[in-house]
Amino acid sequence: MSRIMGEKRRVVVTGLGMATPLGLSVSESWDKALKGIGGIRSLGYPAAQKSPVQAVGEVSERDWDQIAKRFPDEAAAHGERRTLFALWAARSALDDSTLDVAKANSGRCGVMLAAGAPINRLEDINPWITPEGGFDYRRFGREYGQLHRESIMRNNTHRPSALVAAQCGLGGPNGTISSACASATQALGLAFRSIQRGESDMMLAGGADSMINPVGLVFFVLLGAANTTREDPTGACRPFDRKRAGLVMGEGAGVIVLEEESHARERGARIYAEVAGYGSSMDAHQVTAPDPKGVGAARSMAAAVSDAGMDLGEIDYINAHGTGTKLNDMAETLAIRNTFGEQADRLVVNSSKPLTGHLLAASGGPEFVFTTLSVHQDRVHPTLNLTSPDRKCNLDYVSDGQRSLPVGAAISNSFGFGGQNASILIKKYQS
Amino acid sequence: MSEPVVITGRSLATALGRGLDETWDSLLAGRSGIGDIEGFDASGFPCQSAACVSGIDEQSLDLPRRESRIMDLHSFVLMKCATEAMAESGRPQHEDGGGDTGFFAAIGMVDYKQEDLIGAVSASRDAQGGIDYDRFYDQNFRDIFPLWPLSMLNNIALCQVAVRLGLRGENTVFSPHGDSALQAVAEAAATVVEGGNSAALAGGVGEKVSESSLARGLLHGMLNTRDRVDPCRPFSNDRAGGVLGEGGGAVLLESRARAEERGASATAAVSGYGAAFGLADPANATTGPSTDAIQRAMTLAIERAGRSPDEVDLVIAHGDGTREGDRQEWEAISGIFSRQDSKTRLYSSKGALGNLLGGAPIVDLILAERMIQTGLIPPTYGIGDGETIAGSMLVRGQPLEARPRVVLINGFSYEGQAGSLLTEALG
């Protein structure tokens, strides 16, 4: 088996790429994050005026046009929003890393991306409903060629990771993670392991997702987890706040270049930070709600710290999953308390979701980018809308403007519906 | 070398049987599980054949309605196989509170059932028969069962198993094709080696044969639209495409030392894995991996197991019966095992079982273990007496008593991902 023999290889972050409601440039998005300028607005398209969900984090139309212009062939052929977000973020990360793939060993450069729930379209059902209210399978069998290009029947979850690899010329390991909202952090974790073990030298990892489509809009309403505020969309997502009232969906992608340390150093790459540990766990509690005590989430954080060979006291900052649902934020707070004990009070915590919305399967991507930049620059962005703290959520959440503090090491958390948890640990790079 | 990772429990479900013995006996006897699709009226489709599983449902698994309401065939198969693999291993279910039992699974695309949405869609039609979204959003979306969204998530099947079996360790859901299943086995094994999990389940399930999965297979150009008798003919000269297959499997992996410590028996170890990407046809995103990518994945798996191609007794091919896929794979295989006197044999299960996508390589791994145990390789079904591109390597006609000890398993996607896994007899 591929195994870590003796010394583990070190893994560093050398490239960052994003496409989110904050924009298409990492530096501009980071600047907005620090200033507390969020990207959540009222839903753009007219057909969804009556949608119970109105506050969403959409990639702006102007940015979308720019993406489609950059990848005209893919836009024409594959159209699916998520795939194009993935391409944009991957290309940006690769550009940022300055890695010349043509000079690298392509077979040792791979891709590991998150994929969310595919797009279910009412228009894939409607034309074949019979007068009796059934489905005309026979006629559908003759007419399935009419399905929309975004239909689940045209799009395998593998498509983003495959197209990114094909576009960027990466012939190494290539995988797709479908662990709900834990997916992108798991993709980053597995990419980290792949490099550590020596299976690859460079991995593009992260994810892309969008559920801002007609059926996607009611997805979390049905589950009772969505924020259905119609007024004040920018204030809708309120992690750890007493008035938090559910998650706000965002869309986009975050893709990161992870690289083996000597590989990066030999080519003189800028190193943002080091990935030092990864942990994952399952709640095994129930699939409809997180374990209220956050036991699984605690084990995932503890596993990441122990994987890094670090002490709990060395962690300075946690980029929380922080969805702004009643259940998550309470359970996550307890999980942090239970993991860190007395050390919990010296941690700072924030959530990026009021900035971008919840990018679902992809959420770990942009959050990894922000966490990396905090470690790199010793600055932590504020948690927007945390104005009336929930007394039971009793950690030091950065809320009132950005905070400057030495960030030696940080954890980014992602927890998936069903009870899958993932935590990744990023620390300052020292040669 | 560190401690081998061994298989201590296994279970599968295929169109040929609810379990391993039935499937194995049928494969040896040269039977196929492929037939006419009966679950819905497929008569309008240009492909009407598939290999369908029967008898695995909420009743047979004794699942309460509140659990089964968000499950479909893929969840039932995963639940059945994971539960049985765990039980067969004899490993105490809640050892260490399950905290270090991991679960890695490959799960195919998860499609909605028409009956779950059709009420809301019908009620939201406008006078012209289109969708009136105002009506949908106003109230009709409430016709959808509130937990229906969970049933659309690939990972819920894994989470339901975790709840039932108390699995709390490292985990990942990969999707949707054969390469993903090999990745699941490799990651599960790696966590056992590295100590993240003391034991880990690795599973894989394909897609339910439905109007959606059939449409997807056809839109990707993977299915035989020409003939209904033995439609999947791996490596045959007149092969004309693949066939969907239902089912999947799960194995429990442990370190050999731990298994021996508690007196569990094992026959085979998982010893090498390789993965690569490359499109067979760069102009067509769904023609599967290239010869080069396949060859790299296979070579890595062999090398990382510390083996040479000479030592590989059998390749269980991806061999899905597609024109281009089988050609690319055969070129890769013949490039590695090119010597005239090569004793390496070739087998594909897909002519009898269909393409189980994310479930296929797990089933092949369990079959490989049985081949190692019994010394027999079943005949590749579907090729009759016809000419093949694979010459004498391909096992056909009768079971072959070849006593394979080192077996390489291939699993690919439609999109260019190639994976390869080496399993071998314990010395």
Image: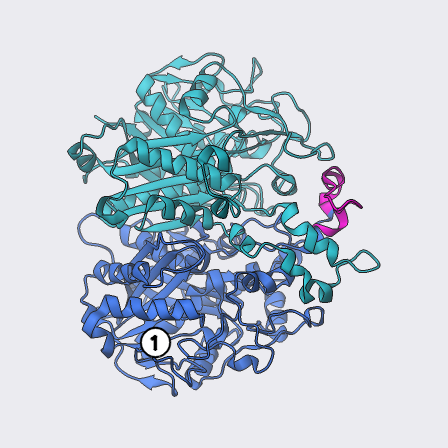
In front of the other: A213 or B345: A213
Image coords of residue B285 (percent x, y): 58, 47
Query: In the figure, B155 relative to B305: above or below?
Result: below
Type of amino acid under label 1? Cys
Image coords of residue B204 (percent x, y): 43, 39
Magenta residue check for B343? no
**Residue A82 shows up from this direction:** yes
Which of the chains is blue? A
Quadrant of residue B23 within the rendered picture: top left
Seen in the image, is A398 located left or right of residue A245?
left
In front of the other: A79 or B264: B264
Residue at horizontal 75 percent and vertical 63 percent from the top: B132
The chain carrying label 1 is A
How many labels, in total? 1
The part of the chain drawn in magenta is: A125-145
Image coords of residue B179 (percent x, y): 44, 41
Residue at horizontal 37 percent and vertical 26 percent from the top: B368
Query: In the figure, A414 relative to B1: above or below?
Result: below
**Residue furthest toward the left?**
B261
Provide the residue designation for mark 1: A393
Image coords of residue B338 (percent x, y): 40, 25
Q: Quadrant location of the C terminus of chain B?
A: top left
Q: Colour of chain B?
A: cyan
